Image (cartoon, rainbow, N blue to C red):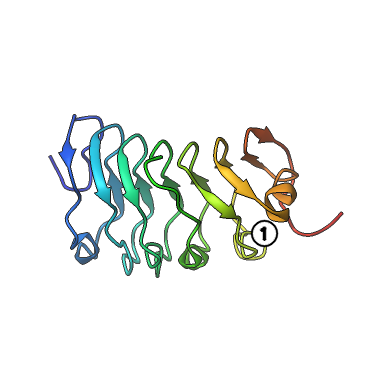
Amino acid sequence: MSPSKAASHSVSGTLHSNVSSLTALKRFEVMNNQLYGALPSFAGLTQLQVLLLHHNNFTSIPADFFTDLLALQVIDLGYNDSVAWGIPASLKDCASLHNFTAIQANVTRQIPNFMNALNFPSMFTLKLSFNNLEGGAAHELQRSKSTVNGSRSMGWADGSG
Protein backbone atom coordinates (compact mmCIF):
# COMPACT_ATOMS: atom_id res chain seq x y z
CA MET A 1 0.00 0.00 0.00
CA SER A 2 1.45 3.34 -0.98
CA PRO A 3 1.84 5.97 1.76
CA SER A 4 -0.23 8.32 -0.35
CA LYS A 5 -3.22 5.97 -0.79
CA ALA A 6 -4.44 4.07 2.24
CA ALA A 7 -8.15 4.80 1.88
CA SER A 8 -10.62 2.50 3.61
CA HIS A 9 -8.06 -0.12 4.61
CA SER A 10 -8.78 -0.12 8.37
CA VAL A 11 -5.43 1.53 9.00
CA SER A 12 -4.95 2.68 12.58
CA GLY A 13 -2.27 4.72 14.28
CA THR A 14 -0.79 8.16 13.67
CA LEU A 15 0.68 9.85 10.62
CA HIS A 16 4.46 10.24 10.70
CA SER A 17 5.68 13.76 11.36
CA ASN A 18 7.92 13.83 8.26
CA VAL A 19 5.08 13.63 5.70
CA SER A 20 6.17 17.04 4.39
CA SER A 21 9.41 15.45 3.15
CA LEU A 22 7.42 13.65 0.41
CA THR A 23 7.98 16.61 -1.91
CA ALA A 24 6.70 14.96 -5.13
CA LEU A 25 3.40 13.91 -3.51
CA LYS A 26 0.31 14.84 -5.58
CA ARG A 27 -2.44 12.88 -3.76
CA PHE A 28 -2.71 11.84 -0.14
CA GLU A 29 -5.76 9.70 0.64
CA VAL A 30 -6.19 8.14 4.07
CA MET A 31 -9.93 8.61 4.53
CA ASN A 32 -12.22 6.12 6.27
CA ASN A 33 -9.62 4.67 8.63
CA GLN A 34 -8.90 4.78 12.35
CA LEU A 35 -6.06 7.30 12.28
CA TYR A 36 -5.73 9.54 15.33
CA GLY A 37 -3.57 12.14 16.99
CA ALA A 38 -2.27 15.45 15.72
CA LEU A 39 -2.02 15.93 11.99
CA PRO A 40 1.54 16.61 10.89
CA SER A 41 2.26 19.71 8.85
CA PHE A 42 1.89 19.33 5.11
CA ALA A 43 3.72 22.65 4.62
CA GLY A 44 5.88 22.90 1.53
CA LEU A 45 4.24 20.12 -0.50
CA THR A 46 3.93 22.42 -3.50
CA GLN A 47 2.76 19.66 -5.87
CA LEU A 48 0.03 18.25 -3.59
CA GLN A 49 -3.36 18.53 -5.33
CA VAL A 50 -5.70 16.28 -3.34
CA LEU A 51 -5.74 15.73 0.43
CA LEU A 52 -8.46 13.40 1.75
CA LEU A 53 -8.34 12.93 5.52
CA HIS A 54 -12.05 12.57 6.34
CA HIS A 55 -13.62 9.97 8.65
CA ASN A 56 -10.69 9.53 11.04
CA ASN A 57 -9.97 10.75 14.57
CA PHE A 58 -7.37 13.46 14.10
CA THR A 59 -7.15 15.73 17.11
CA SER A 60 -5.46 18.91 15.87
CA ILE A 61 -4.24 20.80 12.82
CA PRO A 62 -0.99 22.78 13.05
CA ALA A 63 -1.08 26.48 12.16
CA ASP A 64 1.31 25.96 9.22
CA PHE A 65 -0.64 22.97 7.87
CA PHE A 66 -1.50 24.65 4.52
CA THR A 67 1.68 26.73 4.08
CA ASP A 68 2.91 26.64 0.46
CA LEU A 69 0.32 24.09 -0.71
CA LEU A 70 0.17 26.05 -3.93
CA ALA A 71 -1.36 23.30 -6.12
CA LEU A 72 -3.94 22.06 -3.59
CA GLN A 73 -7.35 21.78 -5.23
CA VAL A 74 -9.31 19.46 -2.91
CA ILE A 75 -9.18 19.06 0.87
CA ASP A 76 -11.60 17.02 2.95
CA LEU A 77 -11.16 17.09 6.73
CA GLY A 78 -14.77 16.13 7.51
CA TYR A 79 -15.82 13.94 10.41
CA ASN A 80 -12.69 14.50 12.47
CA ASP A 81 -14.39 16.12 15.43
CA SER A 82 -12.17 15.21 18.36
CA VAL A 83 -10.85 18.68 19.25
CA ALA A 84 -12.12 22.14 18.32
CA TRP A 85 -9.99 24.04 15.82
CA GLY A 86 -10.14 27.20 13.74
CA ILE A 87 -9.34 27.54 10.06
CA PRO A 88 -5.62 28.40 10.03
CA ALA A 89 -4.36 31.52 8.26
CA SER A 90 -2.04 29.30 6.21
CA LEU A 91 -5.08 28.23 4.15
CA LYS A 92 -4.65 31.51 2.26
CA ASP A 93 -1.65 29.90 0.49
CA CYS A 94 -4.04 27.52 -1.30
CA ALA A 95 -5.30 29.89 -4.00
CA SER A 96 -5.93 26.94 -6.40
CA LEU A 97 -8.47 25.42 -4.02
CA HIS A 98 -11.70 24.23 -5.67
CA ASN A 99 -13.20 22.22 -2.82
CA PHE A 100 -12.80 22.72 0.94
CA THR A 101 -14.84 20.31 3.06
CA ALA A 102 -14.84 20.15 6.85
CA ILE A 103 -18.32 18.85 7.66
CA GLN A 104 -18.77 17.95 11.34
CA ALA A 105 -15.09 18.59 12.02
CA ASN A 106 -15.58 20.72 15.15
CA VAL A 107 -14.50 23.88 13.34
CA THR A 108 -15.04 26.80 15.71
CA ARG A 109 -14.46 30.54 15.85
CA GLN A 110 -15.02 32.88 12.94
CA ILE A 111 -14.45 32.08 9.30
CA PRO A 112 -11.36 34.12 8.39
CA ASN A 113 -11.94 37.28 6.33
CA PHE A 114 -9.57 35.99 3.65
CA MET A 115 -12.11 33.28 2.71
CA ASN A 116 -13.54 35.14 -0.27
CA ALA A 117 -13.68 35.04 -4.07
CA LEU A 118 -10.63 37.28 -4.46
CA ASN A 119 -8.33 34.86 -2.63
CA PHE A 120 -10.01 31.68 -3.90
CA PRO A 121 -11.17 32.44 -7.46
CA SER A 122 -11.56 28.74 -8.34
CA MET A 123 -13.51 27.79 -5.19
CA PHE A 124 -16.61 25.90 -6.17
CA THR A 125 -17.48 23.98 -3.02
CA LEU A 126 -17.14 25.08 0.58
CA LYS A 127 -18.78 22.69 3.04
CA LEU A 128 -18.63 23.63 6.70
CA SER A 129 -21.96 22.31 7.98
CA PHE A 130 -22.48 20.92 11.48
CA ASN A 131 -19.73 22.97 13.10
CA ASN A 132 -19.74 25.78 15.66
CA LEU A 133 -18.96 28.78 13.49
CA GLU A 134 -19.74 32.32 14.56
CA GLY A 135 -19.61 35.86 13.24
CA GLY A 136 -20.54 37.74 10.10
CA ALA A 137 -18.44 35.75 7.63
CA ALA A 138 -20.53 32.63 8.27
CA HIS A 139 -23.64 34.67 7.44
CA GLU A 140 -22.02 36.10 4.27
CA LEU A 141 -20.97 32.64 3.08
CA GLN A 142 -24.54 31.44 3.35
CA ARG A 143 -25.06 33.47 0.13
CA SER A 144 -22.29 31.51 -1.59
CA LYS A 145 -21.88 28.20 -3.45
CA SER A 146 -21.28 26.68 -0.07
CA THR A 147 -22.78 24.79 2.79
CA VAL A 148 -22.27 26.54 6.10
CA ASN A 149 -23.90 25.06 9.20
CA GLY A 150 -26.45 23.22 7.09
CA SER A 151 -27.39 26.08 4.72
CA ARG A 152 -26.89 25.76 0.94
CA SER A 153 -26.91 28.71 -1.41
CA MET A 154 -25.68 30.04 -4.74
CA GLY A 155 -23.16 32.97 -4.93
CA TRP A 156 -19.64 33.57 -3.56
CA ALA A 157 -19.29 35.77 -0.51
CA ASP A 158 -17.65 38.73 -2.19
CA GLY A 159 -19.03 41.47 0.02
CA SER A 160 -21.66 42.57 -2.47
CA GLY A 161 -25.22 43.05 -1.27
Residue 100 in the image: state x and y as whole percent.
Answer: 51, 48
Q: Check disc 1 and give the amino acid type.
A: Ala
Q: Is residue 36 left or right of residue 48?
A: left
Left or right of 17: which side holds 132?
right
Q: Nearer the viewer, residue 62 or 10?
A: 62
Q: Residues within 10 Å of mark 1 (few under 14, many from 20)?
A: some
In the shown orientation, is residue 10 left or right of residue 123? left
Q: Secondary structure at mark 1?
A: loop
Q: How many circles with numbers are drawn on the protein? A: 1
Residue 149: tell me if it is visible: yes
> Residue beneath label 1, please?
117
Is residue 150 rendered to the left or right of residue 33?
right
Q: Is residue 96 above or below residue 98?
A: below
Residue at the location (30% across, 62% down)? 41
Q: Quadrant of the C terminus?
A: bottom right
Q: Quadrant of residue 129?
A: top right
Q: Is residue 97 above or below residue 105?
A: below
Q: Going by the picture, which residue comes out furthest to the right?
A: 161
Which residue occupies 41% across, 44% down? 77
Q: Position of residue 9 (x, y in %)?
A: 19, 30
Residue 120 x, y percent position in the rendering? 59, 60
The quadrant in which the N terminus is found is: top left
Above-or-below relation of 136 to 82? below
Asked whether residue 125 appears in the rendered view, the answer is no
Residue 34, picture quadrant: top left
Q: Residue farthest to the left?
A: 1
